[in-house]
Amino acid sequence: MSSKFMAGLTAFFTSFEGIIVSATALVIAVRALLKELNNIGLPDWMRRRRKAQADSNQVVKHHPRHGFGYLAIVIALLLVAAVGFCVGLFFKYISPSRPLELEGSTNVYGYLKQHYPDQLTNNVLLSDLGSAKALEHIFQLFDYGRRVADPKRQGVFALSSNGTVALRDIVAKNSNPAFIQDNYWLNINLAQQPLFILYRGIPLSELKVERANQLPPEAPKNAQKAFLPYSYNFVRVSELKRFLGRVTGDKVRLYLPEPGTGTRALFDASQRKPFDWPNAEQLPAYIEQLNGVFPLLLMASDLPSSRESGSVAQPCKLLQELKLKVAFICADNDNNCDDFPRANLSLIVKLARDTTLGGTRFHIANAAECNFARAIYDKLDASCNITGNPEPYHIIELNPQLQLTLPEYSHCDGGDD
């Protein structure tokens, strides 16, 4: 019996509907069992008398049963219903499961919601933190890894739009072995894609947005480039900085990444000089909050989450309804637009180390974490065992060689401004 089938069966029995079904089946089975036991012990003359009475009353004939075939079926049904009822009751009310917590970048959460919506159930909670803060927390979590194997602990993932950069910095600067020796992490690299802006109501005379059909937009003559079957919008960093330096919030609503977020760190890292970020409004929790006719500019590394699960699978339709356009940000420090500040959308979880194999084998100790990780990265085995060299930062990477790609909504607007 597959682990997915067993997981689905357990999920059903632990749901409210499963408890109702099990309880109903239990009542039916008990009634059938009592009726069967009542019939088995009757003598032949009483069965004949009941049969004659039934025939005279024109009711369904009662055929005497011999053996225990029907009884065995009833007892089996009774046991299944009783076990299901007890399991469901235990997990639902006596030992309720603790929700899985996702901490960090809403950009990564938006990516998960678009590509893995079935995994973001009511038992998965999001804590909106910057990538750096989420990685700092997962460094400290579970007593710096010493209690990571505790089966009763909370399940936690860190979401980062800047990979493990902040986590590696923390490890490199920390020389205390008490904080390092039991601290290990697994990084599941989800995607690598350029930073972009969503904008509306901004004329080209104020913000110059260009188009290209190759990656990067302006590669040197002898450099390798990838030609695309479609064109996309891009804006140069120098042009975006110029616009942000002179636009006012009463003219265009700005939604920019906050300090400590991976998106801001990536944009800053692409500059040779520090950028003086203007005041901006809080980033929306849902993309539908951008509905309206007001001009706006939003910087992100993935689309904000959608309220409607059905809309997530149709980002182009949603962007068109909101009249939003997409333009990718291209670094042009040498006047050529030949590179992108690129987000590394990552899912990071703490690992338990198996010390019997020389420190090269690890596993995800929490069942909720393991199930979530396997749904995202299906090459993990049922026990979420991982073998690898975590040095020098105590991090094992999955999908470390991801290539830069443009998301599917890169050419949604399909035309000029």
Image (cartoon, rainbow, N blue to C red):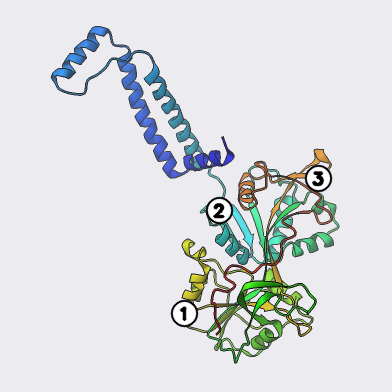
Mark sitting on residue 360: 3
- Asked which secondary structure carries label 3, the reply is loop
Mark sitting on residue 183: none
Earlier-in-chain disc, 1 versus 2: 2
Which amino acid type corresponds to the residue marked 2 in the rendered image?
Gln
Earlier-in-chain disc, 3 versus 1: 1
Q: Give how far apart the Cα atoms at labels 2 and 3 are.
A: 29 Å
Q: Give how far apart the Cα atoms at labels 1 and 2 are.
A: 31 Å
The residue drawn where x is 53% and y is 52% is 123
Closest to the observer: 152 or 213? 213
Do tag 1 and tag 2 residues touch (Cβ < 8 Å)? no
Closest to the observer: 248 or 217? 217
| Location of residue 376 with respect to 343 vertically, above or below | above
| Location of residue 366 with respect to 170 vertically, above or below | above
Percent x, y of residue 380: 67, 46
- Asked which secondary structure carries label 2, the reply is helix
Mark sitting on residue 119: 2
Q: Which residue is mark 1?
A: 292
Quarter that holds the N terminus: top right
Q: Is 330 displayed left or right of 307 in the figure?
A: right
Q: Is 356 displayed left or right of 202 in the figure?
A: right
Looking at this view, name the residue that lies furthest to the bottom.
205
